[in-house]
Image: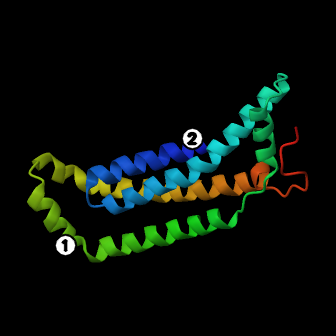
Amino acid sequence: MNGRYVLLIAFLSLVINGISLYNLLIGYISLFIMLIVLIPNIFIKIIEIGKNAKARGADNIIVKAIMDFEKNTHSKAIYIFGIIFLYLAGGSLLVFQIYQYDYIDGLVTSNVNIPIYYSVVTYLIGIGYVLFGASLITMTIHFRKLFREALLFQKNDESRYVEM
């Protein structure tokens, strides 16, 4: 699973849940899904740029530092903890929204005075839940693939310091 698809689904979840106002808190969790996927992908992209520069023959301190950065092993535990936390937070907010639906409905109806909104909002709530669930599942699939394939998460016994 490519990271940009996870980011796209999480962004759509953020937008739809933000528009529906009933699922606003789940939209915030979608923002954290985007962050937890984006950060390791940025590191992997930096390493890829360093490899391409090394293949072209660049031999400066920045390229050496990037290539040395690949040798550092990053812990999977914080990402696994983050994924578990996002599942628990999403589930608990879902239960909270179900039990507090009357209060949330009263808050939204007293503040939003657009008649067409109330005919569309029930569909937006359902679509928001589906997109949020899809973003959680695709994030899990993405990280399973990332943990297996990315050198960033593999053990490496080489030197961890730039040699000049």
Above or below for 3 versus 101: above
Residue at horizontal 83 percent and vertical 27 percent from the top: 59
Give the amino acid type for the residue marked by disc 2 in the picture. Arg
- Image point (57%, 65%), residue name: 82
Q: Position of residue 146 (x, y in %)?
A: 71, 52
Earlier residue among tags 2 and 1? 2
Looking at the image, can residue 92 be seen? Answer: yes
Describe residue 44's horizontal placement relative to residue 84 as left or right: right
Q: Nearer the viewer, mark 2 or mark 1?
A: 2
Q: How far apart, in angstroms, are the residues tagged by discs 2 and 1?
A: 36 Å
**Furthest residue to the right?**
158
Residue sticking out furthest to the front? 164
**Residue at point 14% right, 46% down?**
116
Most distant residue in the bottom direction = 99
Q: Amino acid at mark 1?
A: Asp
Image quarter for residue 44? top right
Circle 1 sits in a helix, a strand or a loop, which is it? helix
* Residue 102, label in figure: 1
Q: Which mark is residue 4?
A: 2
Quarter of the view holding residue 56: top right
Q: Is 143 on the left-hand or right-hand side of 38? A: right
Residue 139 pos. (x, y %): 58, 55
Task: Report whether 113 appears left or right of 32.
Answer: left
